[in-house]
Image (cartoon, rainbow, N blue to C red):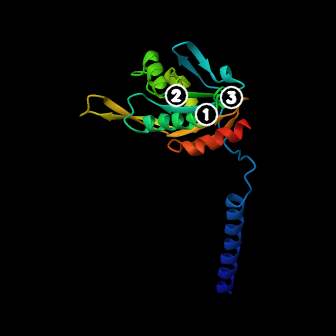
Amino acid sequence: MMTRNINLLIIVMLILAAVIVSLVYLKPNNSYQPVQLGGEFQGKSIDGDVSLTDFRGKLVLLYFGYTSCPDICPTSLTSMKFAFNELDDEQLNQIQPIFYSVDPDRDSLEQLQVYSQFFSPLILGMTGSRQQIDSAIKLYGAYYRMVEQPDSAMGYTVDHSSKIYLIDQQGEFLGSVSHNNPNQLVEKIRSILQ
């Protein structure tokens, strides 16, 4: 009789455990919302305040980096330059490439203009306050972090995203492309501008 009661108790406990597991782990999560990337960003260029709305009607190519970057940024901006060489004048008039510095302590607006224009006169160099930068980074799912380099004259480097973010003529985020594939960038630009 006691064994029967213990077996019955074990069965009841297993059923309760199964019900709890199904309620906790198998319950559909109706509150799940996919993260929507993109949105309005602000900052400054040598010509004054800049925001995404300034470029309505143009395809924006947004890249986050910094002028002291030893390799990734030059590669990315060179890829943009090569891509622009494949576009005709009509297409070039419909795009606005932006180099957004995440290192405003070292990158002056004058420095950003010279650096960006070295790669292409089309590229707008800009930066912002730390709050503006962090907001833009979050909006586009990008990242950056300062890495101390105590044995270097630079003092620190910056790890950062290496994608080119595409924003359509109405300010909607379309996606991103690799920083080192000018052919892919040309194809994307042409397909969006058609």
- Front in this rendered view, residue 111 or 148: 111
**Residue 35 drawn at (x, y percent):** 66, 42
**Residue 92 drawn at (x, y percent):** 63, 29
Q: Quadrant of residue 8?
A: bottom right
Dots 1, 2 in contact, CB < 8 A: no
Label 2: state its secondary structure.
Answer: strand
Amino acid type at circle 1 is: Leu
Above or below for 154 versus 1: above
Q: Is residue 10 left or right of residue 159?
A: right
**How far apart, in angstroms, are the residues tagged by discs 1 and 3?**
30 Å
Q: Which residue is mark 3?
A: 90
**How far apart, in angstroms, are the residues tagged by discs 1 and 2?**
16 Å
Q: Which mark is on residue 99? A: 2
Q: Which residue occupies 53% across, 17% down?
A: 45
Dots 2, 3 in contact, CB < 8 A: no
The answer to whether one can see residue 142 in this image is no
**Residue 65 drawn at (x, y percent):** 47, 32
Q: Which residue is mark 1?
A: 139
First in sequence: mark 1 vs mark 2 = 2
Q: Which residue occupies 43% across, 26% down?
A: 103
Q: Which residue occupies 70% across, 29% down?
A: 171
Above or below for 194 versus 20: above
Q: Quadrant of residue 175?
A: top right
Amino acid type at circle 2 is: Phe
